[in-house]
Amino acid sequence: MHADFQPTVYILASRRYGTLYVGVTSHLMQRLHQHREGIFEGFTADHNVKMLIWYEQHATMETVILREKQIKKWNRQWKINLIEMENPNWRDLAVDLGFPTLPSRKL
């Protein structure tokens, strides 16, 4: 198995209590780079969803995909509760992983 292989389900946000996105990846650092740089067109790029606010790593892609499907079925408040159990201040956890702080957005 490749050293960078790390099945992960994650939640990104545009800002605190902003737009949420639930995703899955086998390489978290690479996927975060793609989201933060807007490399792919789609929902996260259209809604400026770049802050990593929650993630959970698993042993296999099968279990991480099942967890992603479970969370995607949840209502918004349940997702917020999940986030706030571990990250009550909605810090951008990508900074802890070595990514630069995102620039502030004016609303």
Image (cartoon, rainbow, N blue to C red):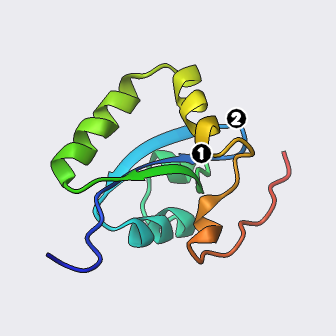
Observer-nearest residue: 38 or 33? 33
Q: Quadrant of residue 88?
A: top right
Mark 1 near mark 2, Cβ–Cβ under 8 Å?
no
Q: Is 7 situated above or below 70?
A: below
Across and down, in percent, residue 67 comes to 30, 37
Q: How many marks?
A: 2
Residue at 68% x, 37% y: name it: 18
**Residue bearing the label numbered 2:** 17
Give SS at disc 1. Answer: loop
Foreground: 87 or 46? Answer: 87
Image location (x, y in percent) of residue 24: 33, 51
Task: Locate residue 20: give its quadrant.
Answer: top right
Mark 1 / mark 2, whichever is N-terminal: 2
Secondary structure state at the residue bearing disc 2: loop
**Is 91 positioned to the left or the right of 43 in the image?**
right
- Residue 84: in sight, yes or no? yes
Q: For the residues marked 1 and 2, what is the alpha-carbon distance in whole angstroms?
A: 13 Å
Disc sitting over residue 47 in the figure: 1
The amino acid beneath tag 1 is His
**Residue found at the very far right of the displayed protein:** 106
**Residue 29 drawn above or below residue 49:** below
Instruction: Estimate how packed mark 2 is, as few (under 14), some (14 to 19) or many (20 or more) residues with alpha carbons within 10 Å.
Output: few
The amino acid type, in three-letter code, at marker 2 is Tyr
